[in-house]
Image (cartoon, coloured by chain):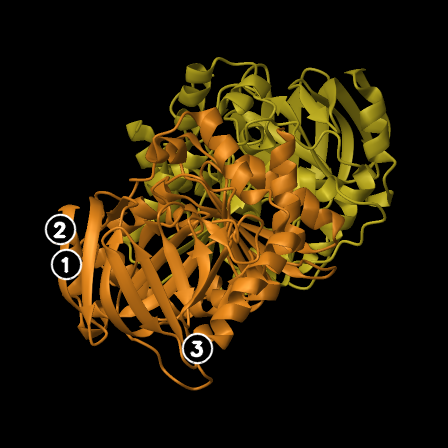
Chain colours: A yellow, B orange
């Protein structure tokens, strides 16, 4: 077994999920994620946790979802009971075909998702962490060779998370103390209020309220957005390739938009509901182990020297206790490269310039 | 997908598990059993059951069992809660290596098994069925080519179960009404009492208290065994090959034994405890889809025209309500071929002669 698989398992169990003796662990294993599951099982054994392993097979769920006429979807009582008894839930993604559900009817998917609401809430109440084992299917989706993709994943996952968390704390402090963020680059001059909002230091650990491995972003919930922004990182929305999106905001709402490719997909998103035209998230990607777009949001939005904005739903963690943020059925992230000819200001002071943060070597020189 | 995989799934869900709308189903999938799991998921969907899939990976459990020093094994609360909420439990066996646990310490295996007692009892309280998907590893264990083994498995599984159940009812009636069974063949003249015992018609369906697919045997719990018996079907006990076992009974107990190969393994079994020297089961194999020994008890003991006897624990289902049968930590089946030069008598009347039963064509002629 590749040593990096064992290291990945260690990071997942120790840094991310903080598993302790006696923890009741459920691990969900995708079709192609067997090797990482084996490595994680060994780490869980060493820590005297218990283990129940579920099979997150897209082909099994496709067959189940497609079968029969006039289906009624009900939640699984065994799944709910299992999750309610769990302390930790580890989702080991990594399928063998990223389009395995391509021929499942959208209404059925929705009905099944709705039937799973209680189970989902029980899962979110555990110390859950979602990660991914590099598979050939994911390499293909990323447009990469298999070994090349393995290197990419482990560069992103096997970070010095403690020191990255410390570095990201700088960004969180600046955002927590600040009231206005401005982003300036090609075709971009955007101002957002972050007054009264709390930033999340998403350091790939439940100890930081962060549930993805890899992570490496600091995010908050902006409002009162004004100006123009250009997203030069390509993405896929509802199976449509989208490139070079421009959004224009007035009074916090998108009033104009364009895209070099996939403009219809953007239009559909913005038309979903009222909240879909307002921002739900401002995220600052700080994981420099991720240096390229791979068409997977788990990685893309944490890419070092990028900023992403999401139209739609805001996360409660960023809002004052009891206050509701922007509400919407969607949350669609779009990413812009901040590594060159770009600046981010907080309250008029430059925080990031051409990919270098204020606290880093080389910032003053520029 | 091989049509036989779909047929196997149908038999499992309909005939064996009797799944109905609203049933809460847990399906456990071995590493090599993916295709059958997909087919079963479709059948469950058609019947509006719910589905939670667990991953019965020997490599995951090996890694978990071997890890760490001075392990304490505790039961999994999520597993117990899951099973307590389940109506139906389908175990889809079919590993990729039948010796995947070869380097797991026996004491650890035992400790983990003990920790799983509550979960096992909860599983036995469901409508559970255990079956197997043909894999290359199982073909290898059987000493067969892969396609040859697939044919073997489907011949055993895809029976007309309804008519086999009816045929087996003849045997059950004879045993239920009889008081003494005698078996006569080469190196064999054995008499057992079945007075007061009830035979089980094991027709591969929960409706018959039968939990294996394939099945196809009628079994009861004999006592007061006298005489000699010779087992000419080879078997594996504790990873040791055993051949040509002879047992001599006096007063219900084994007083002498020999084997052409693996005599030590037999000695170890018989020395386990007091009950290990007495019979726990007399089984009559009636599945003529199984025509050869494949070193898998799921198949071997149901082979048509064989009889098996087990030393050790008796099944409660064969005993009068509240009465305990032979008790032992072991239950080891040994098989003898009844197809040639052999007779089985109940209360002095021939029931089976040279592989033909009393109710079958050709019986009178011999």
What residue is pinned by disc 3? B197
Checking the image for residue B263, the label placed there is 2
Q: Residue at x 36, y 82 (%)?
A: B324
Task: Give left or right: position of B311 versus B203.
Answer: left
Task: Give left or right: position of B199 versus A308.
Answer: left
Does label 2 lie on the same chain as label 3? yes
Toward the viewer: A364 or A259?
A259
Task: Give left or right: position of A225 versus B128.
Answer: right
Mark in front: 3 vs 2: 3
Of the residues under marks 3 and 1, which one precedes in the sequence?
3
Number of numbered markers: 3
Measuring from the top left, give residue B5's x and y in whole percent. 60, 36
Measuring from the top left, give residue B97's x and y in whole percent. 34, 36
Of the residues under marks 1 and 2, which one precedes in the sequence?
1
Checking the image for residue B257, the label placed there is 1
Q: In the picture, which quadrant includes the N terminus of chain A?
A: top left
Q: Residues within 10 Å of mark 3 (few under 14, many from 20)?
A: many
In the image, is residue B120 above or below residue A150? below
Q: Residue at x 67, y 17 (%)?
A: A232
Does label 2 lie on the same chain as label 1? yes
> Are the residues at dot 3 and dot 1 in contact (C-beta closer than 8 Å)?
no
User: What is the C-alpha distance between the residues marked 3 and 2?
Assistant: 31 Å
User: What is the C-alpha distance between the residues marked 1 and 2?
Assistant: 8 Å
User: What is the C-alpha distance between the residues marked 3 and 1?
Assistant: 27 Å
> Are the residues at dot 3 and dot 2 in contact (C-beta closer than 8 Å)?
no
Measuring from the top left, give residue A218's x and y in whole percent. 53, 40
> Are the residues at dot 1 and dot 2 in contact (C-beta closer than 8 Å)?
yes
Taking the image as drawn, is residue A179 in sight?
A: no
């Amino acid at each position: 077994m590749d040593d990096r698989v064992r290291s990945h398992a260690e990071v997942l169990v120790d840094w991310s999920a903080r598993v302790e003796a006696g923890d009741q662990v459920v691990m969900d294993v995708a079709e192609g994620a067997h090797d990482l599951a084996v490595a994680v099982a060994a780490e869980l054994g060493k820590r005297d946790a218990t283990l129940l392993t579920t099979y997150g097979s897209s082909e099994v769920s496709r067959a189940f979802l497609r079968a029969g006429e006039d289906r009624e979807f009900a939640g699984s009582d065994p799944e709910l009971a299992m999750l309610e008894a769990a302390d930790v839930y580890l989702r080991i993604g990594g399928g063998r075909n990223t389009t395995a559900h391509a021929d499942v009817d959208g209404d059925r998917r929705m009905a099944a998702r709705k039937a799973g609401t209680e189970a989902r809430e029980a899962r979110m109440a555990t110390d859950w962490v979602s990660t991914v084992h590099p598979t050939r299917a994911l390499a293909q989706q990323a447009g990469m060779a298999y070994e090349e993709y393995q290197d990419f994943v482990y560069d992103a996952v096997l970070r010095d998370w403690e020191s990255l968390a410390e570095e990201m704390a700088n960004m969180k402090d600046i955002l927590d103390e600040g009231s206005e963020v401005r982003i300036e680059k090609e075709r971009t001059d955007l101002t957002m209020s972050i007054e009264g909002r709390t930033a999340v230091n998403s350091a790939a650990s439940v100890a930081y309220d962060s549930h993805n491995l890899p992570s490496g972003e600091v995010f908050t919930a902006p409002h009162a957005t004004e100006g123009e922004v250009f997203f030069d990182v390509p993405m896929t929305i509802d199976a449509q390739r989208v490139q070079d999106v421009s959004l224009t905001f007035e009074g916090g709402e998108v009033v104009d938009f364009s895209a070099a490719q996939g403009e219809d997909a953007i239009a559909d998103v913005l038309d979903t509901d009222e909240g879909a035209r307002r921002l739900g998230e401002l995220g600052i990607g700080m994981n420099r182990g991720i240096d390229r777009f791979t068409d997977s949001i788990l990685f893309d939005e944490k890419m070092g020297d990028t900023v992403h904005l999401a139209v739609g739903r805001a996360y409660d963690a960023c809002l004052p206790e009891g206050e509701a943020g922007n509400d919407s059925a969607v949350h669609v992230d779009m990413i812009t490269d901040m590594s060159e000819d770009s600046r981010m200001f907080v309250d008029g002071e430059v925080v990031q310039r051409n990919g270098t943060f204020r606290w880093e070597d080389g910032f003053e020189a520029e």
